[in-house]
Image: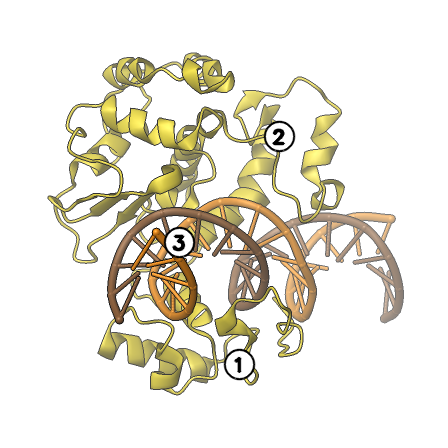
Chain colours: A yellow, B brown, C orange
Amino acid sequence: MRIPSSSSSSTSKATPCCSKVGIKRGPWTPEEDEILANFVQKEGEGRWRTLPKRAGLQRCGKSCRLRWMNYLRPSVKRGHIGPDEEDLILRLHRLLGNRWSLIAGRIPGRTDNEIKNYWNTHLSKKLISQGIDPRTHKPLINNDSIPNLQRRENSEPNKKSNIPHPISQASNYQTDAAIHQGSTGYQNITEGNHNSTGNDDVVVMGMGRVEVKHDINGGQEDTFSSFLDSLINDSGVDNQQLQDNVFAFTSPAQSFNPVFWESELDQMSNGYFRG
DNA sequence: AAAGACCCCAACCGCCGACCA
DNA sequence: ATGGTCGGCGGTTGGGGTCTT
């Protein structure tokens, strides 16, 4: 938890909405939660910047959005992450890297923040204990790296990882583009365009970002969702074989071969949610 | 029982792309 | 074409709880 402080946010780098004097920070009170929940349920999500004023909250819009998305939303599932969910997170992370939002989009009721926290506090350590590098899902070679990964204090603070996920390393943009190109049914998804044929609104962003905006009413899976379902099903694929192929992407972008994904997909069967 | 070490996770930060005037 | 605003993302922090010595 952060220290509720108005002065600490008054840096030149602070985002405007959070640097205003009089904006409350830190943990939310039950009263604030109630105000926010009632307001969003009544008025709907969106217009976060102006929401605090309209709702009568002394918070910045970002803080309101985060609180709603990660805690107050009725669809948020609280509590222990089960073995099935854990396995799914591992599979998705192996394929997608630290794309927590995308991973969360495939796990009903879980938020990106929750999955990110769970990964950092549980799964990464679990993989390390199994001799697997949690960043690459590749077997750890140098034992010296183990203690450095186990303790946050031993890693360089305030620095982003220099070792990207192997898939991302091949260039995020090319990866996503290749994913779409390399699977039937995705040729209609182009960068910057929305595919709204299903109830999920799939948006392929620039810089390789892929966002899946869910229809809270649920419904038919769109093609991208189906594609992800097939990706996370590797029951017909040897894990080591998959890893070996994924790690073939560690060389520059031109080594990324979308044909690989097609062949892998062909081998994948028995959808996770279907089974 | 006390103190220090360690862990968890809610919340914040900085950045990015989309959108709009 | 440009600049401002907004929503959303991943990375990071640090207070408080728990564990260990």
Q: Earlier in the sequence, mark 3 or mark 2?
A: 3
Q: CA distance from mark 3 to mark 2?
A: 24 Å
Q: From the image, tell me which residue sits under label 3.
A: A111
Disc on res. A23: 1
Q: Quadrant of the N terminus of chain A?
A: bottom right
Position of residue A270 relative to residue A148, above or below, is above
Q: Nearer the viewer, mark 2 or mark 1?
A: 1
> Do marks 3 and 2 share a subunit?
yes
Q: CA distance from mark 2 to mark 1?
A: 41 Å
**Percent coordinates x, y for residue A191 in the rendering:** 26, 38
Q: Quadrant of residue A27?
A: bottom right
Q: Earlier in the sequence, mark 2 or mark 1?
A: 1
Q: Nearer the viewer, mark 1 or mark 3?
A: 1
Position of residue A180 relative to residue C12, above or below, is above
Q: CA distance from mark 1 to mark 3?
A: 25 Å
Residue at the image position 51 percent from the left and 18 percent from the top: A250
Position of residue A232 relative to residue A191, above or below, is above
Q: Chain of mark 1?
A: A
Q: Quadrant of residue A236?
A: top left
Label 1: element kind = loop
Residue at the image position 62 percent from the left and 76 percent from the top: A4
Q: Quadrant of the C terminus of chain A?
A: top left
Q: Nearer the viewer, mark 3 or mark 2?
A: 3
Label 2: element kind = helix
Q: Does residue A166 appear anywhere in the picture?
A: yes
Disc on res. A128: 2
**Percent coordinates x, y for residue A9 in the rendering:** 62, 72
Q: Chain of mark 3?
A: A
Disc on res. A147: none
Label 3: element kind = loop
